[in-house]
Amino acid sequence: MSEFFAGELAMVLNRGRGTATHRYARALAWRENLPATYAALSGGELDESRAAALADVLGSVDAGLAAVIEGRLLPEAVDLSVTTLKERARELLLELDAAGADTRREEAQQSAGVFLQPGADGMATLGADLPADEAAEGYAVIDTLARMAKADGDHRPVARIRTELFSLLLRRPGGHGQPDVTAHLTITASLDALEGSTAAAGTVNGLVITAAHVRSLLARIAALGLQPPPNGSLTFALTDTDGRLLATTTVAELLRLAKTGCTQHPEGDCGCPVLSAPPATEAYAHTARQERFVTTRDRTCRMPNCGQRVGWTDLDHVVPHAHDGATTCTNLCCLCRSHHRLKTFARGWDFRMDPDGTLHVTTASGITRTTRPPGLRKPRHHPAQPGPPQLSHRPGILDLLQRRRTEPPDTGPDDEPPTF
């Protein structure tokens, strides 16, 4: 099976790679370990939620053991809640294969991680995969501290107190006497919104950034009191009215441009642009200004449905440098290491990028997805553009699996990282 199968499936389903991998694992579990469950699901005798619960618990165990547990639970599955069915499956698995459970727990610990999931209205969920005893101990500590605060007169709901303690324990693990941890954050907002004159979201609007415009920006920035944080940075993104990024700059650069103005017409405000996108370079390696521009434009990995932040991404030549691809902002985009590897080694994939940063990705099976940089609004007019052919039939998970099993494996090293 190709290492890039999950990436192609994600494109077909139009979901993230994690979701695609999880759904593929379920489909494989039904086919290999739980044929009776799959038959009941196909025949309408069992709903997908309960079939998925069995697959999640029994998908990675020995097929013979899975069949025994399936035989015990399937007759009563429809009479149990999804949560109870999953708990019963785990209980039987521990009872019948205690040694295997220890091995699987060790494997799970090796692949555990911390996750950040954006939520609504400016909220987000921060969590971690932990051993059950450590998770229970951590919750008990937070709950005890919250109830102590409640007993001392804190009138807020105890859930709100727990949340604040969780945040404080993470961000100030040594207490208030410890030095702050420096974090670099990118905040995008329009000057009009910051001043309160509009509720519009976006960045600074402007088509031609002249010396006069720079001085106007500096005056407004000074009035707002915007300053770089200690040991951090403050980057300004300037866009047109459709959200297309035109330039990135800093307060220091704005001060320099306001002072020097246009080198061709030093006498006054001639209207010549003095700030624009970074120029191309003849070298393979991108410049620091190009990196600032592209990471500000893209913000995350540009693969459809991938949200890996730019701090963990590579700047990739969309048209490879070895194939005459220019090192310019219109040919560079952010890709996480996994999707960078896919683009480099997976056969039959096609990546194209428009001058405004819109990226078109076509899989080996002919599925095309398009992503625009965050903040770039969809064009009002859609001129016909030639593109890769579309499939009249969207292949399913098992269709793709069967096709990939009949194809020769992808070439390219399995262990060594790509030479980007």
Image: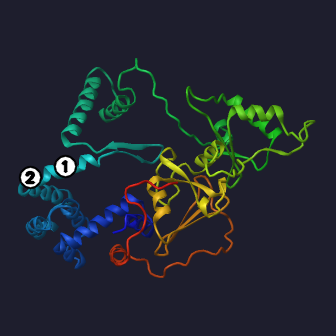
The x, y position of residue 371, in whole percent, is 55, 61
Position of residue 10 in the picture relative to residue 356 (left or right): left
What residue is shown at x 60% (from left), y 74% (from top)? 387
The x, y position of residue 330, in whole percent, is 66, 57
Q: Can the viewer see residue 243 in this picture?
A: no
- Callout count: 2
The x, y position of residue 291, in whole percent, is 61, 45
Question: Is 174 located above or below residue 22 in the figure?
Answer: above
Please state which of residues 148 and 221 is positioned toward the viewer in this rendering.
221
Question: Is 407 located above or below residue 69 in the figure?
Answer: below
Mark 2 residue crowding within 10 angstroms, few (<14) / some (14–19) / many (20+): few
Per the image, label 2 sits on a secondary structure element best described as: helix
Please state which of residues 383 and 149 is positioned toward the viewer in this rendering.
383
**Which quarter of the rendered picture does the N terminus lie within?**
bottom left
Q: Amino acid at mark 2?
A: Ala
The image quadrant that residue 153 belongs to is top left
Separation (CA) of disc 1 from disc 2: 11 Å
The image quadrant that residue 414 belongs to is bottom left
Circle 1 is placed at which residue position?
A: 105
The x, y position of residue 343, in whole percent, is 50, 62
Position of residue 263 in the picture relative to residue 18 (left or right): right
Using the image, tell me which numbered label, if any, was put on residue 98. Answer: 2
Q: Amino acid at mark 1?
A: Arg
The image quadrant that residue 149 belongs to is top left
